[in-house]
Image: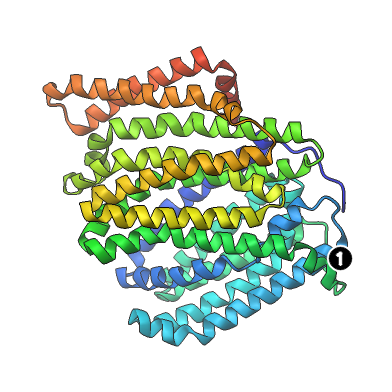
């Protein structure tokens, strides 16, 4: 089990992106059907349960999956050890959720939450069963198989939920969806992988990855808390009324970037791991990935800043006009975070998850301090605080990443300079077009489409003029594998 294929970031990313798009379509269609079969209360209870399961999900594989992927000399004993650790962790988490289900239900004042948590608890040992097999598939860059399993399991779960809801099972339909999804996922990973677990495992193998895995798990917990701290501060200091616009603005900025970041980091990590013997290849691969991510997100966020008012009017309606000013601050945050999204893969490949943990902890403290300071100036202040904290912390995070890759900071700046100009240019052109169209009093949709077309035209011209190699990469990435 020690042989690694020569993987491709582009090929991995195409399959992952295809899966993300397919799942989004299934989700859109499925939710439109379920919304007619289930009550808002059912979705509300499930949302409360998801808060618990998302947090518990961070502990599901205890960081052992990435440890398997980066292992240079894979042994059957290590794979077996990871399998049994994952299964044990899944069982413990399930028992903990069941044990605390009643207090959690009292906390949220929802009696029906108890049985929902009992059902969802079963998904943890089920998902843990296939976690090692999924990691081995990703280690071999078999993302075509991973993507197919992901889409089929997600679609199966959604179909099961629709059939159950149509049969009148109500809230239980959403629990059945989770159980079918997790079962189909683990079953497909198990069947697709050639490795089969046995009872042969060794504590020494577990200890060899314990430091890496524990630091990675704690780092993910810190990130989770950091990503939810701003909403807690807004809700506590400014109230639920203020939280609505802030939450929507954050989701508008975050959703497309999360998808891009997920695809980029997931596709990049096995490739970096496979080239641990070739630092030059690692540097080149990482720089190309960061530059390509920035090529997509810079014009996306620049256009969002310029077209924020007509976009919000069309997408959300006039009553959400207060969301638009927040995007001026949050869109640049989104661009910087997209560039940072590939950095954790470098820390993991280099085995410095301890550095990643401390860096994320310090960044979280900085963000919380800036949010608290900005709260004195309302929602705009918190959004501005987010940008300030990001601009302060990003150079440090990227600087440490460059150090791990034994690369000069200026090399990264040269790789990103035209992407930054691209984002500013798209923003400027789209903003100018919006101002020209303003006196015509066109509908918001017309202004959005026309000004967006000018911004898109400039963006394509810019890439062809200053980044011709990226234009080729963009065309290649748009073709399915």
> Residue 228 appears in which quarter of the rendering?
bottom left
Residue sitting at x 37%, y 25%: 424
Residue 296's place in the image compared with 229, above or below, is above
The image's colouring method is rainbow
Q: Residue at x 79, y 35 (%)?
A: 278
Residue placed most toward the observer, 351 or 199:
351
Residue 128 locus on image (x, y percent):
67, 68
Label 1 crowding class (10 Å Cα cut-off): few <14, some 14-19, many 20+?
Answer: some
Residue 445, placed above or below residue 359 = above
Q: Where does residue 31 sit, x and y in percent of width and height?
A: 40, 58
Secondary structure under tag 1 reads: helix
243 displayed left or right of 15 = left
Looking at the rendering, which quadrant does residue 439 occupy?
A: top left
Which residue is located at x 66 percent, y 44 percent? 346
Q: Is residue 472 above or below residue 186?
A: above
| Nearest the eye: 183 or 281 | 281
The answer to whether 480 appears left or right of 386 in the picture is right
Q: Nearer the viewer, residue 161 or 296?
A: 296
The residue that label 1 is drawn on is: 77
The answer to whether residue 393 is visible is yes
Position of the C terminus by quadrant: top right
Q: Position of residue 335 (x, y in %)?
A: 44, 37
Number of marks in picture: 1
């Amino acid at each position: 089990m020690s042989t690694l294929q020569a993987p491709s970031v582009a090929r991995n990313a195409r399959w992952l992106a295809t899966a993300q798009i397919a799942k989004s379509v299934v989700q859109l269609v499925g939710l439109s059907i379920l919304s007619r079969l289930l009550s808002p209360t059912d979705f509300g209870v499930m949302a409360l349960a998801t808060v618990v399961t998302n947090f518990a999900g961070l502990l599901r594989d205890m960081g052992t999956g990435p440890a398997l992927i980066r292992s240079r000399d894979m042994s059957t004993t290590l794979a077996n050890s990871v399998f049994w650790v994952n299964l044990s962790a899944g069982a413990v988490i399930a028992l903990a959720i069941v044990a605390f289900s009643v207090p959690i239900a009292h906390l949220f004042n929802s009696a029906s939450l108890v049985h929902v948590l009992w059902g969802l608890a079963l998904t943890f040992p089920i998902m843990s069963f296939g976690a090692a097999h999924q990691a081995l598939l990703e280690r071999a860059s078999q993302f075509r198989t991973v993507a197919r399993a992901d889409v089929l399991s997600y679609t199966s779960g959604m179909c099961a939920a629709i059939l159950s809801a149509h049969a009148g099972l109500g809230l239980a339909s959403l629990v059945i969806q989770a159980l079918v999804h997790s079962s189909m996922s683990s079953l497909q990973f198990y069947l697709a992988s050639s490795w089969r677990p046995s009872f042969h495992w060794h504590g020494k193998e577990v200890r060899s990855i314990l430091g890496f895995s524990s630091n990675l798990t704690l780092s993910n917990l810190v990130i989770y808390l950091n990503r939810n701290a701003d909403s807690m501060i807004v809700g506590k200091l400014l109230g639920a009324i203020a939280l609505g616009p802030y939450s929507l603005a954050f989701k508008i900025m975050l959703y497309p970037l999360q998808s891009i970041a997920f695809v980029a980091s997931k596709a990049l990590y096995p490739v970096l791991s496979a080239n641990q013997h070739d630092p030059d290849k690692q540097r080149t691969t990482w720089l190309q990935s960061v530059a390509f991510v920035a090529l997509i997100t810079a014009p996306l966020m620049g256009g969002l800043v310029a077209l924020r008012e007509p976009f919000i009017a069309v997408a959300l309606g006039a009553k959400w006009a207060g969301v638009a000013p927040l995007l001026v601050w949050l869109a640049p945050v989104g661009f910087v975070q997209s560039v940072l999204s590939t950095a954790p893969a470098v820390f993991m490949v280099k085995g410095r998850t301890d550095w990643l943990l401390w860096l994320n902890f310090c960044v979280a403290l900085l963000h919380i301090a800036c949010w608290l300071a900005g709260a004195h100036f309302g929602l705009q202040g918190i959004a501005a605080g987010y940008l300030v904290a990001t601009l302060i912390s990003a150079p440090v995070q990227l600087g440490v990443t460059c150090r791990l890759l034994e690369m000069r900071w200026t090399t990264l700046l040269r790789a990103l300079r035209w992407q930054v100009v691209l984002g500013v240019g798209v923003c400027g052109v789209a903003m100018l077009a919006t101002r020209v169209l303003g006196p015509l009093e066109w509908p918001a949709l017309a202004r959005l489409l026309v000004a967006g077309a000018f911004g898109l035209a400039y963006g394509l011209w810019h890439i062809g003029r200053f980044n011709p190699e990226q234009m080729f990469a963009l065309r290649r990435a748009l073709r399915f594998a």
